[in-house]
Amino acid sequence: MKKTLTLGILGLALHLAAPAANAQTTLEYPGGPHSGITSSEIQSLKGWSQNAMADITRLLNEIQPMLDASDVKRKLSFGMENIAQNSDTKAADLLLRQAIYAGLTVNRLIEQESIRRGMENAPQGTVDQQVRILKHSLEMAKEYYKSDFAYINGILSKKDTSYVNPKLVEFGVRFSQFLIKMSDGVLDASASYGMIRWSLGILENYLGQDSRNVVYASTIKHLHDELKQYPNIVTGQSAPEDITCIKYVRELKRLAQETYKEIKQTTDNIQMAEPAQSSVQTPTPVRAPAAPMTNAGSWSAPDRASIAACGWFDGATHGIAARGWHRFHIVRNIYISDKYYDNEGAASAYSCYSDVVQQDYYQNAVATAKANECTCKWLDGSGDSHNINPPSRGWHLAYPVAVDKDLKLNVSVRYFDNNGTSSQEACNRELVKRHFQCD
């Protein structure tokens, strides 16, 4: 199940107008993968990608003897448009197609800015860069052809159409780095700026679409907040003045380097945390002194989060900064805090576990315990290595839920104070009144 990030920044849809042979054709740049691919569509994707590879190889061979850069540019752009137009929207999941559309988008941007300035053609140096960008797009399309097939086979093996291409972020970083390098040779200041701004916006979207987007959350938010102040001329916003574009280029290059560094650190941490075995094993978290802690539960695939669990964290390990009790889950051995419950011992632990057992995962266990194990219990308000108790010391109408193989949560339905036999009697009367059920 693909996890989505609620930062309000996903679903970026970009469009560009690209000239075909005899008409103006609108091409959509895919902002990220689609979901709900059927088995017949998967077979169609395989067929299209194989045909596209043959067309790419033929196109690159045909331009080798050509000497005029303008002719090469026209040949490449026209050929790439034909490849793209032969695909359907589901092919947006393939990085081969993303590479082709990225090259066409940037090529169109450069031509658009030349026209805006009243020039019929871009300067020769810029044309040379357009050729390099288009050729590099095709080379990247060929390179990611194999990973696309691995991705398609992953969908088939997992029987999960929301499975996200695992090379998505890597591709986004590499293409962004390439465009920033190429922007130095584009003589039009607004086109140079537009290339960088657009590439970082697409990278932001790729991070958000990645199956591990939760671990990239801080990077996505930082990138999103920074990019808001820079107009995206690819999507139709007005281009700034040249002097402003030059200033923006410097700023965006710094932002890009910061972003690449953050992504590399996060990716390195993920790789270090992944188990060496092919099968995924649930890690065993440390236990807090005098405070029980469950493990993270079972999971079905390395790119899916475990069920939520509770744990006490010391604030210095596991990548969680706040010392105390957290409801957390794990993504590929990366610990993610969902909610912090303070550091008040049994009270914080009980609050956390009481929330956790509301998950569907525990639904049957809770229903059975309410019906068959409801009883009056004197609880000491602290718990031990095998029990999580409510913080109020005394008599409780309660039922137990196993949150781990050797750990139970005593869920209090009603508290009857700590007045000895009188509290016990009041609890017993309530138990009989409820027909020995905790509903």
Image: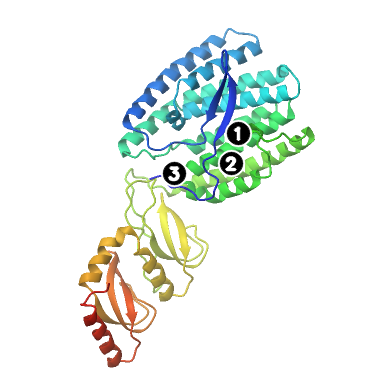
Question: Dot 3: what SS?
Answer: loop
Q: Is residue 324 above or below residue 61?
A: below
| Residue at x 63% of width, y 11% of height | 71
Q: Which residue is mark 3?
A: 211
Q: Is residue 212 above or below residue 342?
A: above
From the top left corner, tell me how far across and down residue 203 is, in percent.
56, 38
From the top left corner, tell me how far across and down residue 224 is, in percent.
60, 46
Q: CA distance from mark 1 to mark 2?
A: 9 Å
Which of the two residues, 98 or 18, is positioned nearer the viewer here? 18
Q: Quadrant of the C terminus?
A: bottom left
From the top left corner, tell me how far across and down residue 68 is, in percent.
65, 9
Q: Quadrant of the N terminus?
A: top left
Which of the two residues, 86 or 1, is positioned nearer the viewer here? 86
Q: Which residue is mark 1?
A: 177
Residue 134, by quadrant, is top right
Mark 3 against mark 1, which lies toward the viewer?
Answer: 3
Task: Indicate which disc, 1 or 2, sits on the residue closer to the N terminus.
Answer: 1
Task: Indicate which disc, 3 or 2, sits on the residue closer to the N terminus.
Answer: 3
Q: Are marks 1 and 2 in contact (CB under 8 Å)?
A: yes
Which of the two residues, 226 or 416, is positioned nearer the viewer here? 416
Question: Dot 2: what SS?
Answer: helix
Which of the two residues, 404 or 99, is positioned nearer the viewer here? 99
Q: Amino acid at mark 3?
A: Ser
Question: Dot 1: what SS?
Answer: helix
Q: Is residue 41 left or right of residue 87?
A: left
Q: Is residue 61 left or right of residue 2?
A: right
Q: Is residue 363 above or below residue 393?
A: above
Q: Amino acid at mark 1?
A: Gln
Q: CA distance from mark 3 to mark 2?
A: 18 Å
Q: Residues within 10 Å of mark 3 (few under 14, many from 20)?
A: many
Task: Indicate which disc, 3 or 1, sits on the residue closer to the N terminus.
Answer: 1
Q: Amino acid at mark 2?
A: Tyr
